[in-house]
Each structure stands twice: as structure tokens, then as C-alpha cells.
Amino acid sequence: MEDGNEEPNLNKPLVISVYEEVWNEFYEWEQQYSKIMLESLQVDYSEPENELWVYPIEKSIAAHTFVDGWNQKPTSIRHSEKITIKTTNRLASSHKLNFDMPCIIAETAEPSSHYEMLTPILSNFFYGDDPDYMPFNPFPEDEDFDIESYSMEYGNLAWGVDVLDPDKEAIIWETYRKLYFYHDLDLDSIDTTDVFPSIFSTYYGERDLLQWRTFPVLHEENPTKYYLPKSEEFQKRLNLASSQFCPNLSCIMSRCGAHIDQPGKIKSKVTNSILQSNKPLHPCGPHCFLNIKDESAHSYDRHNTENTALLEKVQTMLKYIQDTSVCELAQICFISCTRMYAIIKSLEIGAIHLYGVQESTEEDVSELDLLKDFTTVDSINTCAHEGPCNKNTDCICFANRIHCEKGCRCSPQCNLRYPGCNCGLQGNGKQNIRSCGTWRCPCYHAGRECDPESCRTCNLSPYPYRSHGHCRNSQIQRGYSKKVHVSKSAYGFGLFLDEAASKDDLILEYVGEIIYQPTVVTRDWLVSHRKRGYIYTLTDTLSIDALRRGNESRFINHAKGKEVNCEARYRFVNRELKIGIYALKQIRAGSELFLDYGDYFFNN
């Protein structure tokens, strides 16, 4: 029942009417289709088919000619057996054929060791929790598995969950198509009527549905492709792209699987007069506005219809990169610098002092006992609040006792920002050829990888005064892993090095699904029964499970004492906690990798 204070949705009666129309069309078609299919199953005995004749093998053909294609030697043929084939036609008459068949004794193939299939991934995938319903019995033929206790971990069973009828799916989708192409209703307007499931239109854009329509169709296209903004709708396209783009340096991609929350938008801190006066020292090119002395040449007719689209494009860009120079804006928008300057002069850009105007003071930071153990806090979003980063604001960095990082919307001069290291320079001011990677590096000592923006003297840094040496504390973010391969070992499958590794070299990152603790408890039933587990504790509430998604690192076997040649280490990289597998000593190429799983793994 609709709320009395809300206006009725005028499109809803039309949607319901078309839905009923398509419903009747579908089931009228289905009756005829079912009748035809059932009649096609009837066997016709009126005319017998030709009998199938199988001719015996000619005796003149040598036996080894039948096995040459199998790369078998004639000596592998030990004997032949009598084979009888009986053929029967529809009239029940039969015919028997007898001939000799050479038999080959093949070498016995050793069975593969037990392992679980996985989807290979390059970085962690945030999964969260398994569904509240149990999808199936994982070991239906194994009486040793305690299915009753395992099922109690779930709220209900899969067959108790409502599933959309496939017939209804086809009907709803045809309704969408008709409403879009014949009644000029866009997909968002159809969704707002709440007649169909809210996720239907987006989910079924990738669904192959039953082709049941028997009448001529003018529009065969999939309507969901029209969810994408049109080419002329620049602002919608940019909003869609920015909402799906992950700026974390571990990703730099759209629709990543690791990060849920996106950082807050940067607000402008300048006016258009400041933007105009913020002129570069040198022209950016022959068409730079600095080369034109006559200010009248910078006029721009905002009411010209040809300029409307360009004006909207520039206004949209200024919502995302407000404090960018005129020359840089011109390059981004693919127009001349002179034309961009004229547009900026015609716009009214008010100053919005929201983020980063007030900076946290040294007194604010001195009160904070910064976190030493990153495993006690989950990965959190960057801060985006009004005012300084202290206890009196909603700064999530201050609340979680961690440094502000790149992506935080506070000022770059915020005192809570991580200061970085200075390992790229030695005490005499000279460049350090082999920087970081030891306990003398404050980043390494804190369990962090060096930061490109904070550690300005590392060769990781983009700044011109960086060291030209080799930063040893940035291996995960740079992807400096070793070549490895999975092969048989003394304990099923194992992981072997294809190239030599030095002490403290990153072998590879341990990746998998990031799951919550309740899901860890549920999956522990499967781990205990299989006697194989791939779960690493990440924080107090999160773990990494490489059972379904992961990489080769999950094949590293357990060992004790001198056999152990690598270990897992936590590293705080680009504001998230990761696990890297590092060499404990010099390891030769071809060696198998061994980890000490620890007592907790075997006790649990």
C-alpha cells in the first residue's frame, strides 16, 4: 500500500498492464510449444530403418596398425579378445558380428594427489560472509562428515530460499523490452515503479533468455545496454566511471574486488579569480593564454549553442579537479589553452572551504598513541571531514589511531600524515645505493612498505631528488615476486622456485578471499574434514581464505627446523594489510618452499 503522503507513480499502471499482456502471450505460446515437443517424442513404427551393419576386421590388417596412432609399440599388444556386436532395428530383428580385437596393456597411471580447484587472482578479493543458507551438503557420500552439526551453522537450507521462476524471468524481461522500445520508458523509470525486483534490470543484462516470441520483433536489442549514459551525457559518464574507479595504488582500476568504500570527493578551495591569477611561469605551448596580451581575445559567449556542450564538460571536470591550473585543464579537455582561459573567466566558481583548511596541530598528534599492531584494525576508508584531524572531529584515522595517508581529504601538511623515511640518503647526504629493507628503516620497523609520496628519498618516490638505489621495502606494491611452479612433492603438491631468491626477497603475496570471522568458523568444518586448510588470520575480525580464490602460495607445504626456508609477514601497503611470503635465507632455483604453519594451525 502506497504512503498517503507520496504521489502515485503514474507509470505503474502502464507497467502492470504490459506485464499482464506479456504474461498471457507467454503462456499461450508455452501450451503450443509443449504440445509440439511432446508429439516429437512419439516413435514412428510405420517404416523400418536400414539395419546397422558393422563389418569384421580384415585378417590381412596387422594388429599394430590399430595402435600406431596411440604412440604404442607393437610389442605392447599382449593378446586379442573375441568381440561380439549385436545390432537391432526398430522391428526387433537382430544381427550378430564376431571379430578379434587387439588388446593393449597400458602402463598404470598414478592417481593425482588430493587438491581443491581455485580461481586464480592477483590480489585479495573481499568476500565478506557466506550466505545464511546452506547451499548443499559438501560431502553427501561421506558418513564421517557431521552434516547435522555443520548445517546448524546456517540459518536455513537452500531449498527454502525463494528462487525466481525461469518462466517469470522471461516474462519480466520481455516486459522491460516492450516498455523501453514501444512505450518510451527508460529502465530507471521502470525500476521506480517497484513492480519487479530492484536488481532485475541490472542482473539480467548478462543473461541469455529463452527465445520464445513467435511474432515479428522490431527491436531485438538488449535494453540493459541503455543503462550506460549516452555519449553526449558527459557528466553522467564521468560520474559512473568515477563511482566504479578504485584510486588505491594497489588497484588503479575500475570495479576492483578488494575495496568497498570509495574516498570522499575533494572540494574546491579556490575561486575563479584565484584560478585565473594562478598563472604558470612559462607558456605550455604556442596556444597558451600567456602568449595573448589582449584580454578581449579571451571573451567567451556562454549562450552560443555550439559552446554549451563544451561549457558543461568543463563544469563537470571542475567538480573533480577544481584546483587544477588552466593549462592542465586544457590538456584534459582536449582544447586550446586560450579557449580554456576564456571559459574559466566566464564561469562563477565560489570558494568551498570544507576539507583541509584547518590542520591538526602537533599537540593534537602528541595526544594520540599511534597504533603499533595493524592486525588489530580492519582496513578502513580515508578520512573526509570538516576541520582538523583530532578527537573533536569525525576523523576515522584519529579514531583508529593510524596515520592519515594518500587519499585522505585533509591537507598534505596535516601533522597526522605519515612522515615516511629518509633512507635514500646516508648520513653525509650522499645517496644510499641499497636503501630500506632493514630494521633501521622506520617504515620497515613499523611493518609498513615505503610510501611513494612520504618516502621522498627512496627510489620508489616520483620526486626528482629521490635515490637511484633499490628500495627493498616496496616489493609487494611493485609486484617483485619470484617465478614459481606447482609440482608433486613428498606431501601431495608443493611449490618450487624457478629462480634463485636471496634473504628477505618477496617470493609472492598470499592472496585469497577476505572473509569475516563467522565464515571462518563455518569453513573450519570443511578444513577439519579435508585435513587441508588455506586460511590466514589477517586482523581480529578478518581472514584470508585461498580455498576458492588464490594463487600458487597456497601450495607451500609445512616443515620444521632447518627445512623451513620462507615465512609469512604482515605488511601495511597502501592503507591495507597484506601478507607476503619472504625468503628466510638464500634459496636455489628448483628448491621446494617450506613454511612453519605454527602450532595454532594443527591445534585447530
Image: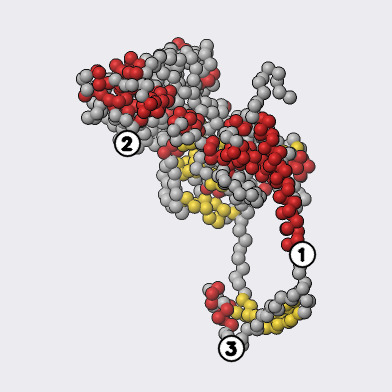
Q: Is residue 536 left or right of residue 410?
A: right
Task: Identify the residue under disc 1.
Answer: 42
As helix, strand or loop, the secondary structure at mark 3 comes to loop
Q: Amino acid at mark 1?
A: Gln
> Residue 154 appears in which quarter of the rendering?
top right
Image location (x, y in percent) of residue 494: 54, 52
Image location (x, y in percent) of residue 296: 25, 18
Number of the front mark, 3 or 2 = 3
Q: Earlier in the sequence, mark 2 or mark 1?
A: 1
> Residue 547 appears in which quarter of the rendering?
top right
Image location (x, y in percent) of residue 195: 68, 32
Task: Identify the residue under disc 2.
Answer: 469
Q: Residues within 10 Å of mark 2 (few under 14, many from 20)?
A: some
* Residue in the image at 60% along x and 30% along y: 189
Task: Identify the residue under disc 3.
Answer: 60
Number of the front mark, 2 or 1 = 1
Mark 3 and mark 1: Cα distance apart in space: 45 Å
